[in-house]
Image: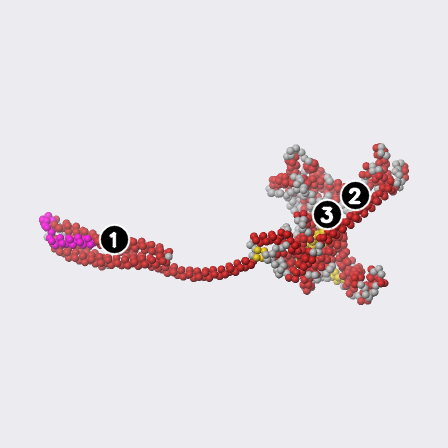
Amino acid sequence: MGQKKTQKQLAGLAAARASRHKPSEKENTIAPPQSPPRSTTRSQRHISTLQDRINEQDIHISFLSQSNSELQAENTSLHHQLVHSRSTIASLQEQNAVSAQKLRETTEELKDAYDEISSQAVIIRKKNQRINRLIHDKSVLSAKLACAKQQVLDAVLRAHAAEKLSKSESLRIETLLQTISSLDQKLDTQQQQQKDLYKTLRATNMREKHAKAVLQQVRTQLRAKSKWSGMNRRMFSSQYRSLALAFTRAGCAQARLGPLLIRVGKILGVTIKRSMSRRTVGRVITEAGIKVRLQLGHELARAKSMYLYLLSAEQFVTAHEILQDVCLSSDGTSVRNIQVEARHLTYAAPTYTTDPEAPQTAFRTRVVGVANALDHTAQTQFEGWEEVNRDIFETYMNSPLANRDSLEGYQLEQDDLWRKMVAYNSDHAADVRLTARKCGEKRQAVIETDVGRQELEHMTTEEAEDALWEVVEEICDDPAALNRSSLPEDLRTEALQSLARHVGAHSIDMLPEQQQALLLRIIIAGCCDHKDHNDNATTIALGTEADSDAVERALKASQRGAHKLVSICGNLFRHKDDKRGHQDLHRHFFTKVKFDITGEHSTIKFPDTSNVRYGSHNAGAAELVTYHAAYLEFLSIIRNSKQTPGLNHSEQNAFNGLNDIPTMTECCVMTLYKNAISDPYMAMTRRPGVNHIDLGPLHARILIFYLIPQYPALMSPLMENLSVTNSPSIPYISWPPGSPHLEIILVAFLKATLPAWERFSSEFSDNSIISQLSPAEKLLICIPANNVMNEGLLGGWRVHSRTRSATTISNFSAQTAYHRNDTETFADAVLNTEEDAVYIMRLARVEDVSGVMRKFRDNLLAFKRRVAEESRGKQKAKEDLAAAKTAKLQAIAVITDPQKLGDLNHDELRQQLDIRRKLIKEEIIAKALLKDMKTKPAMLKAILESDERRLAAGTA
C-alpha cells in the first residue's frame, strides 16, 4: 500500500510542476535560446539513468511475470499429479515450496524496486524544485523538459501496470495456495481411504486364506467323490443296483452294462472303481423279482378280507374290521408256439407316502408276473395261480420282513390269497371262466376248512377223535392194520384236513342262503373291451349252442362285404410286412389330404387290421367313408403311375369295393356304430379309476337306450346327443349316394349286436352277484374294467422277445413288475435293513443256480411228447374206426332199387347214403351237408338223385 501511495504522490507532484512551470507563448517568443546550464545537464543525465533503471525494472518485472506463468503451469501439472498418486503430490509439494520461495524472493526484489523508486522520486522532487527555480531562466529547455516529464509519466504508468500485474499474480498465488490446501484435504481423504482399503485388503486376504482352505477341503471331497466304488461292505450298493435295473430296463445288454457305466462316469468326471459283470446284473434282476414277491406278500398280509367266520353252529358273526378284498386277473397267449400267462392282483395297497395328510392306502393293480406254461387249459392256469401263491408265501415267510410284520400284528398264511379273493377278472373266454370257477372252488374249500377247524375247537377230545377215525376209515384202504392211538403223521394231517372241510361244509349248509352266498360268492367279471372286437358281428352273436351252419354263415360273411374290403385295404395300405403295400406313399398322400381338410398335419397310418386290435375294422371303415373320394383318387394314381397302367388283383378288389354301394353302405353302418357306441363306450370304460362293478348302469343304458330305439339319431352326421367323444371323422362324413337301405341295414346290425351285448353284460343282470352288492360292499371291492394290463404285459413280452431274444421271460417279468409296481419305493420304505439285503442276495443266488428255465424246457418237451403220443393214439384210433366203418360199408350191398330203398329203416338208409358219400364218392352228395339229410325222406331223395346222376354219367 505504501508503494502505491508513493507512486500516486510522485505522479501528482510531477503533474503540478508541469502545470505551474509551463512557459507561456510570450516567454517562448521573447526569450532567446540560451545554452543549458551545467546543473540541467546533470539532471537530464540523472533522469536518463533513472529511466534506464526503470526499464531494467520493467524487464525484471516481465521476467517475474513469466516466472509466475511458469509457476502457474507447474502448479497445474502438480495438481494433476497429486490426483493420481501420492508420490506426485509429494513432488508437487516440494515444487510448491520452491515456487513459494521464489515468489518470496521476487516479492522482496519488487519491494526493493519500490523503495528505490520512492527514493528516486524524492530525489526527482528535489531536482524538480531546482528545475522549477531555473525554468523561468531556461525556457529553451522547456520542450525537452516536457518530453522528459512525459517519459517520467510513462515510467509511472508502467510502474502502475507492474503493480496491477503484481496484484493479479498475488491473486493467482492465493488461488494456487487454496488449490494446494484443497489438494492437501484430498490427500488426507485419500490417505484415509487408503487406510480403509488396507483394512479391506487385510479382510480380503483373510477371506482368501479361508477360501483357499475351504477350496482345498472341497477338492479333497471332490477327489473322494470322483472315485465311486458303488460298494457297501463288499457288496454292490442299492444305488448301483437301482442304476443297473434302470439301464437294463432301457435296453442295455447285461454284459455291456458295466463298461457303459464306467464310460458314463468317465464323461461325468467320476471314476467307478468296480464294474458289474453280466452274471451280477442277472442276479440284480433276479433280486428285483424277489423284492416284487416280498412286496406282494407284505401287502397281502395287510389286506384284510370281507370274510365271515362261523364261530359255532348257532352263531354267525361278521368280521367288521374290513378292508378291501383281492381281485385276481390273468390272460394268456402263445409266443413262438409257447404258451405265456400274465397275472395281476388288484387290492388296496399302501402308498408308502411320508405325507401324513395323504391317503395311506389306495386301490392298485399289481403285476404278479408273466411266465411260461405248458398249455392254456383251465387246470394249468389254476395250477399256475397255486404256484404263484406258494412262491409269494415262501419268499415272504422266510424273510426278515415277515418277522418285523409279525411284531406289528400282520401275518400271512398259506391260503390267504384264496381267503381274500373276491373276484376274478379276465376276458370272456371259456377257459378263463373255468379257471375262475376253479379258483372259487379252492376258496370255498379253504373257507370250509377254516370254519371246520373252528367247529373242531368246540368239540371234546373224544368227539374229535371219533370223527377223525371215521374219516381215516373212509380214506384208508386197510384201516384194521392201523393203530388208532398212533396214526402216521401224514395220514393224520390228511384226515384232519378232510374232517375240517367236511365239518365246515356241513356248518355252512346249516346257514341261511343269503349268508351262504355272502360267504362263498365270487364275482367273475369280463373285459369291457372285448364287447367290440374285430370278429364279425354274427360270429360275436353266436352262443355255445350254435351249430355248424351258423359258423359257416359267419365265416362266409367275414369273406365279403365291408369287413373284407377293410381287410384288403389294410393289406394294401398297412401290411404287417413293412416291405409290402403302399404304406409310405399312402401316408404322404393322406397327410396332405387331411391337412387340406382339417388344417392339421396328421401322419396317422391306416388302421392296423392285420392284427387283433380293438375296433380296427370299424376304424378302417370310418377311414374309407370319411375320405372315400380321396381313396378312389389314390387308387387311380397308383393305376396310372405304373409303367404298364393297371391294378393288381387286390387293388382292383379294393377299387371295386369302394365303388360298390352295398359294400359302402355296410361301411357307413360300421362307422355309425363306431362313432355312436363303440368309441364313447371305450372312452367311458378306459377312464382312470373306473371300477367294473360300477358299470352296470352304463350297460343298461346302452342296451335300453342306444342300440334300438335311437337308431334314427345315428343317421345324423354329428350325433351330438349320443357321442361322448369328438371323433375327428364325424364332421366330414358324407353318406354315399344311392344307399336307400342304410336305415334297414343299421337296424339289422344293431339287432345282431344286441344278443352279444346281453351275453357279455351278464355279470350286470338283475340276478347277478354285482347287482346284489350293497353300496358299502361296492366301496370295498375294486375290479379293473378291462383286461388291458394283462394284454399289455403279454404284448410287451412279445415285442421284448423279438427285439432282445437273449432275455429270459423271468428277467422280463422281474423288471416289468419291479417298475410297474413301484417296488423301488417299497424297498426304500420297508426293505431298508442289511439283513433284508443279505436275504435277497442269498435267495437270488439260490434261484440263479436252480435251473428254472432248463426244468421248464424239459417239462415242455416231455409234455409235447406226451401230447404227440396221445394225438398219435387218437389219430390211430380214428383211422382204425374209419377203416372199420369202411370195411363194414364194403360188406354191405349197394341197393339201387327205389322200392327196396324205400323199405329200409333209418339206419340202413343212412348206410346206403354213407356208401355213396364215402365209397362211391359221388361229388354232389359228398359235398352236401348232413344237416340237410337228417330225415328218411331227405336221405332217400338224395340217394335217388345221386343214382340218377351216376346212371346218366354212365358210372352206375
Provide the residue designation for mark 1.
62
Q: Nearer the viewer, mark 2 or mark 3?
A: 3
Q: Could you tell whether 587 is left or right of 92 in the image?
A: right
Q: Which label sits on residue 337? A: 3
Give the CA distance from mark 2 to mark 3. Answer: 28 Å
Q: Are marks 2 and 3 in contact (CB under 8 Å)?
A: no
Residue placed most toward the observer, 253 or 452: 253
Query: Residue 580's quadrant in the figure?
Result: top right
Give the CA distance from mark 3 to mark 1. Answer: 125 Å
Q: Amino acid at mark 1?
A: Ser
Disc 2 or 1, which lies upstream in sequence?
1
Q: Could you tell whether 345 is left or right of 192 in the image?
A: right
What residue span does the magenta drawing correspond to?
27-54
Q: Could you tell whether 655 is left or right of 15 in the image?
A: right
Q: Quarter of the image containing the N terminus?
A: bottom left
Q: Nearer the viewer, mark 3 or mark 1?
A: 3
Query: Residue 612's quadrant in the figure?
Result: top right
Give the prevailing secondary structure in the magenta stretch: helix
Provide the residue designation for mark 2.
548
Q: From the viewer's perspective, is residue 566 above or below residue 796?
A: above
Q: Are marks 3 and 1 in contact (CB under 8 Å)?
A: no
The residue depicted at 58 percent of the width and 52 percent of the height is: 263
Question: Could you tell me which secondary element the residue under label 2 belongs to?
Answer: helix
Q: Nearer the viewer, mark 2 or mark 1?
A: 1
Q: Position of residue 226 (x, y in %)?
A: 56, 57
- Label 1 Cα crowd, 10 Å radius (few <14 / some 14-19 / many 20+): some
